[in-house]
Image (cartoon, rainbow, N blue to C red):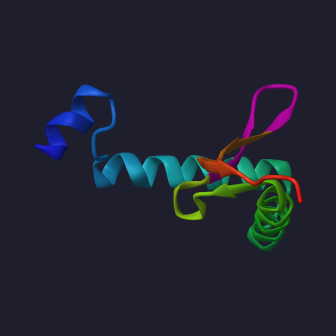
Amino acid sequence: MFDVLMKIFGRSEKKSGQIAKERLQVVLIHDRASVSPETMEQLKGDIITVLSKYMDINRSAMEITLENDANSVALVANIPVNSLRHAK
């Protein structure tokens, strides 16, 4: 039942080949942007630290990647927000 709902709403499980292709694309983009995996992890950690001050985020579902086109590199973040934190 859950699988059917996920397919209806456009969230189907990815095949291993598709996952491998996406990982390779990420590696190639990182290489072109000259960003090491360690730097990306530090960047993710910093983003989590800052956002956690203001909102409750779903860390296990977040995706932060670099994408590039012919002229530039963009940081793309998909970070699900569970709730906002109230000011104290």
Give above or below for 28 relative to 38.
Answer: above
- Magenta segment's dominant SS is strand
Image x and y of residue 54, in percent:
81, 54
Q: Relative to residue 45, is residue 58 drawn left or right?
A: left
Magenta residues (range):
63-74
Q: Give yes or no for residue 39 being in the magenta stretch.
A: no
Identity of the residue drawn at 81% across and 36% down? 74
Residue, far front: 88
Residues 73 and 9: in front is 9
Give above or below for 29 relative to 68.
Answer: below
Q: Relative to residue 57, is residue 40 drawn left or right?
A: right
Image x and y of residue 46, in percent:
85, 65
Identity of the residue drawn at 75% across and 54% down? 85
Residues 9 and 88: in front is 88
Residues 31 and 48: in front is 48
Identity of the residue drawn at 84% across and 61% down? 53
Quadrant into which the N terminus falls: top left
Residue, far left: 1
> Residue 12 lies in what quarter of the image?
top left
